[in-house]
Amino acid sequence: MPGLSPSNIRNVALVGHHGAGKTTLAEALLVATGALPRQGSIERGTTVCDFEPEEVSRQLSVSLAIAPFVLDGIKVNVLDAPGYADFEAEVQIALAVADMAVVVVSAVDGVQAQTEGAWREAAALGLPRVVVINKLDRERADFDRVLAEVRAAFGAGVAPVELPIGTESAFRGVIDLLDDRATLYQPTNGGPVPGREGPIPTTWR
């Protein structure tokens, strides 16, 4: 976006343990905002953030990647940081230039070592933090258990603003607790996932 003012640029760091789904989340954000026409796959080596040959072959992030998109006149630089402790320096670089940290937690694996480390580093820098509980459609996903783990690790002040509709293979949307509305998703084959907003279903768990 030519002539963009620095006041209209935000750096958002995606941090957390390896395998929590940070790179896939970055890819989904790019598709949802129109920066990409189709979501890539880690397994196929077609994501924007994992482009180095070693990352493609090992199917994991080894370096910090930047994935920009524009939304409502704001350019957002998504900083996708690796989740392995071996690449801690990359996480520190991302957080040093970030305006906020998105701590990604797997709904299957819960809070892990690098999750806690990333939270502590972001807190030490005074960064705003939001937790995304990811992989809600996976087998053994448990939102309530993981939310309890997040609160135990980071404080009872952590409060959900969205709740999942369904679980594991029956996951089909989210409830926005601020607007008291639901968004139901109809997955498509690699393309954008349209959301249909409406009232909260009478049975949603």
Image (cartoon, rainbow, N blue to C red):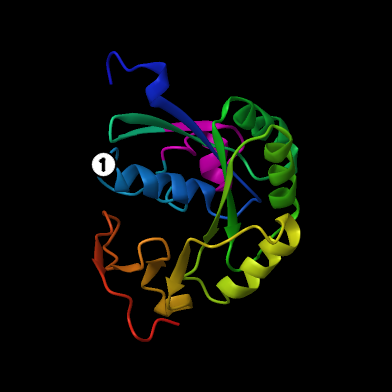
User: Residue 57, image x and y in percent?
Assistant: 54, 44
Residue type, numbered disc 1: Gly
- In the figure, residue 180 lies in which quadrant? bottom left
Q: How many marks?
A: 1
What quarter of the picture does the N terminus occupy? top left
Query: Is 42 left, or right, of 173 in this rendering?
Result: right
Reply yes or no: does residue 60 show up in magenta: yes
* Residue where numbered disc 1 is placed: 34
Q: Look at the image and tell me whether residue 118 can be seen.
A: yes
User: Residue 202, image x and y in percent?
Assistant: 34, 85
42 lies above or below 175:
above
Residue at figure coordinates x 62%, y 40% from the top left: 82
What quarter of the picture does the C terminus occupy? bottom left
Residue at figure coordinates x 43%, y 65% from the top left: 177
Q: Look at the image and tell me whether residue 142 can be seen.
A: no
Task: Write the start and end of the magenta stretch as one range.
Answer: 48-67
Q: Residue furthest bottom?
A: 203
Residue at figure coordinates x 72%, y 36% from the top left: 88
Considering the numbered disc 1 on the image, is that residue within a helix, a strand or a loop? Answer: loop
User: Would you call the spot at circle 1 few (<14 residues within 10 Å), some (14-19), or many (20 or more)?
Assistant: some
User: Residue 135, image x and y in percent?
Assistant: 51, 64
Q: Which of the pair 59/109 is nearer the observer?
A: 109
Query: Is 78 left, or right, of 83 in this rendering?
Result: left
Q: Which of the pair 20/96 is nearer the observer?
A: 96
12 lies above or below 189:
above
- In the figure, residue 164 lies in which quadrant? bottom left
Residue at figure coordinates x 46%, y 53% from the top left: 43
Query: Is 88 left, or right, of 189 in this rendering?
Result: right
Q: Which of the pair 177/189 is nearer the observer?
A: 177
User: Residue 21, image x and y in percent?
Assistant: 53, 53
